Amino acid sequence: MKNQEDKFKKVISHAKEYGYVFQSSEIYDGLSAVYDYAQNGVELKNNIREYWWKAMVQMNENIVGLDSAIFMHPTTWKASGHVDAFNDPLIDNKDSKKRYRADVLIEDYAEKLNLKAKKEIAKAVKRFGDAFNENEFITTNPRVLKYLSKRDEVLKRMGESLENEDLVEVKNLIEELEIACPVSGSKNWTDVKQFNLMFGTKLGASADSAMDLYLRPETAQGIFVNFANVQKTGRMKIPFGIAQTGKAFRNEIVARQFIFRMREFEQMEMQFFVRPGEELKWYEHWKEKRLNWHLSLGLGKENYRFHDHDKLAHYANAAADIEFDFPFGFKELEGIHSRTDFDLKAHEEHSGKKLQFFDHEMNKSYVPYVIETSIGLDRMFLSVFSTALQNEVLEDGSERIVLKLPAVLAPTKAAVLPLVKKDGLPEIARTIINDLKFDFNVSYDEKDAIGRRYRRQDAVGTPFCITVDHETKNDDTVTIRHRDTMQQERVKISDLKSIILKEVSLSNWLHKI
Ligand code: ATP
């Protein structure tokens, strides 16, 4: 746990020190759970977005893009259920004045029971060695049984109370379990209240004609309300998808995990419209496709797992998360949801407009079913960045900090370094940059000894360093150093572009999906 916290702190400070992520309005002491992407962060973020966009829109003939506005007609959010149901149950501790999500307090309690059971299992594995039968142990050991059944009972009671909107019962549960405030240790709680996560604002100049609006809490609804427009003008046939990336806003109650949970964040969503009855087939298809997209980046298969939802949202008939092993454990990175015809039907009812598709093969009209893939761009950024950040001990015992970003996503692909600041070497370096910059981001660095410059580029994640030395003047060759292996080779200046492109070109990476 301590290790995890340390790692996470390192991730946050590295992100700041190397120009990836800054706290918003830092000079005014920041704004809680709002962040800015700095000179390198914006490049990494753009590259992730582009990799997602191309994998969706360019690689699939039947998926098209959209960029709908953040402001939408307020009825949209009535129809989607967000006005009535986009709530989190909150509770305040009267002593520490800290605010919590009541469901998270209870889930954390349940997780502790889970960990206790795991500890018992780990002890037994040690004791019984090869003869250990985990299944038998879990189903017969009285302690494990006690912990797990208590965990299930707690989660079930919470689930039912939330479902019935019985907030008194949620508070009773917290009191019965004697859950204490993690900050103060106090059990002095307020009542549980529902808290709507949407940010409100107003459109219009005069007070009486102003219209109440919301900042969108998800990008998906912009796709649903444009379904008929895109289908008709794009002459799209079922099955087809609409992809969109853009900002979303949620007034999160607890937002303490850096860019994992922000109040302003960016989503990359794709809604795939299918024939009713075929949705579960497509749901499986997209689960597999999306996992492959993640795996193509090479961050390690062991870092991903599916979590199938037992409790489904009111609009879904199947849902799973792709969870990633963040520095604070496995957490949701992307959601894949079978949303039925809930959204389109709701918009039909509220708008009075038909949102249907005439299927020539079936010779009938229907409201399509929807499979949604929804990923947070900032969470994706964190997954890539935190896994890439490594502390390596080298053969000679020294350490280096290296950001092993997938080359396709790295902000700068190559740094060109004249060995010394004289003898015409800087000029040659500039000529190389002026040639390469048409294809990718290249930087120049002439300060400090070459070893320190290499370390600086390692820490910022640049996959290649190109060193110009005196030999270059004689034979037009340079040294190219690979970030991950630290291997160096002597190559012709004229070959640089193709050597680098082989590693960084988006098309080569798309082939891996
Ligand atoms: P969580 O349970 O973590 O609050 P969610 O289930 O509410 O997430 P969805 O509504 O399914 O999330 O949103 C889709 C994706 O958007 C999530 O998988 C996540 O990557 C991203 N996302 C949601 N909320 C936030 C946030 N506050 N900050 C950053 N990314 C977010």
Image: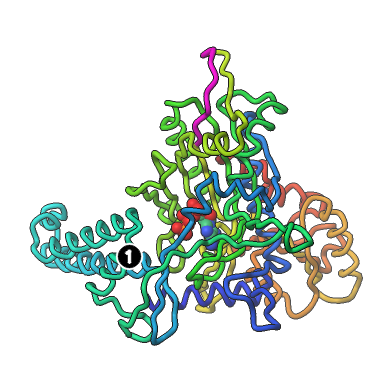
Give the class, few, some or many, for how many residues have Cα within 10 Å of label 1's Cα (few <14, many ≥20). some
Q: Which residues are magenta?
A: 362-370
Q: Does the rendering let one see residue 247?
A: yes
Q: Assess whether residue 461 is covered by the magenta stretch.
A: no
Residue ID at (65%, 28%)? 231
* Vertical placement of residue 219 versus 187, above or below: above
Residue ID at (69%, 56%)? 211
Q: Is mark 1 within 8 Å of ligand 1?
A: no
Name the foreground residue: 438 vs 425. Answer: 438
- Left or right: residue 422 versus residue 456 is right
Q: Assess whether residue 368 is covered by the magenta stretch.
A: yes
* Vertical placement of residue 350 versus 468, above or below: above
Kind of element beneath mark 1:
helix
Name the foreground residue: 347 vs 244. Answer: 347
Percent position of residue 135, x then y: 15, 52
Image quarter for residue 435? bottom right
Percent position of residue 343, x then y: 52, 39
Percent position of residue 6, x then y: 46, 78
**Residue that numbered label 1 is attached to:** 107
Image quarter for residue 485? bottom right
Q: What is the number of callouts on the image? A: 1
Residue ID at (51%, 35%)? 370
Name the foreground residue: 41 vs 194. Answer: 194
> What amino acid type should be assigned to the residue bearing mark 1?
Glu
Percent position of residue 441, x then y: 77, 58
* Quadrant where the C terminus is found in the figure: top right
* Vertical placement of residue 198 versus 397, above or below: above
